Amino acid sequence: MPNATARKFGHPATLIAEYAHWLVQIRPAQATLGALVLICKDEADSFSRISQGAFAELGPVTADIETALARFSPYERLNWLMLMMVDRDVHFHVIPRYSVTQRFADTQFPDPAWPGPPDLGHAVKPDPELLQKLVTAMKANWPQSAH
């Protein structure tokens, strides 16, 4: 059973990849094109409390995320944000950064805060059809080594 954070971010419809300890989901509010959420499946409300298995798996999972995002829409920078102010389960917001507006499926995805910190308050909110296209495209670019 996915945790509350995974459900809040649209699980199972937004699920891209599942690992033993982590879920990778498309972020329903796309702060920038390809924005993801990396959610720990462990019952932990602080980073220091995740299991050793989750810590060990974090390396390969982050490599898969960076590979997939680079294939999907090559980013200029990648921001990893662990905020946990509202959603208490351990998770990261993974925000690809672009100096120019990106386009996907006839929709523009600007990065209005470039080159400063990402603006999570600004986001393209895809309708269900566009969200599914994003999930499908991201899965198509996911490394074959992923679980």
Image (cartoon, grey):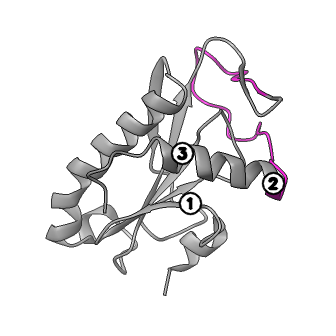
Q: Which residue is mark 3?
A: 138
Amino acid bearing label 2: Glu
Amino acid bearing label 1: Met
Q: Quadrant of residue 49?
A: bottom left
Q: CA distance from mark 2 to mark 3?
A: 14 Å
Q: What residue is shown at x 58% (from left), y 14% (from top)?
A: 115
Left or right of 146 in this view: 130: right
| Range covered by the magenta-colored residues | 108-128
In front of the other: label 3 or label 1?
Answer: 3
Upstream in the sequence, badge 2 or badge 1? Answer: 1
Q: Main secondary structure of the magenta part?
A: loop
Q: What residue is shown at x 50% (from left), y 50% (from top)?
A: 139
Amino acid bearing label 3: Met
Q: CA distance from mark 3 to mark 1?
A: 27 Å
Q: Which residue is mark 1?
A: 85
- Looking at this view, is 105 or 91 the one in front? 105
Left or right of 123 in this view: 22: left
User: Where 131 sits versus 6, above or below?
Assistant: above
Q: Quadrant of residue 17?
A: bottom left
Do tag 2 and tag 1 residues touch (Cβ < 8 Å)? no
**SS assignment at label 2:** helix
Q: Is-magenta flag for residue 117?
A: yes
Left or right of 146 in this view: 103: right
Q: Which mark is residue 129?
A: 2
> Percent x, y for residue 83?
51, 52
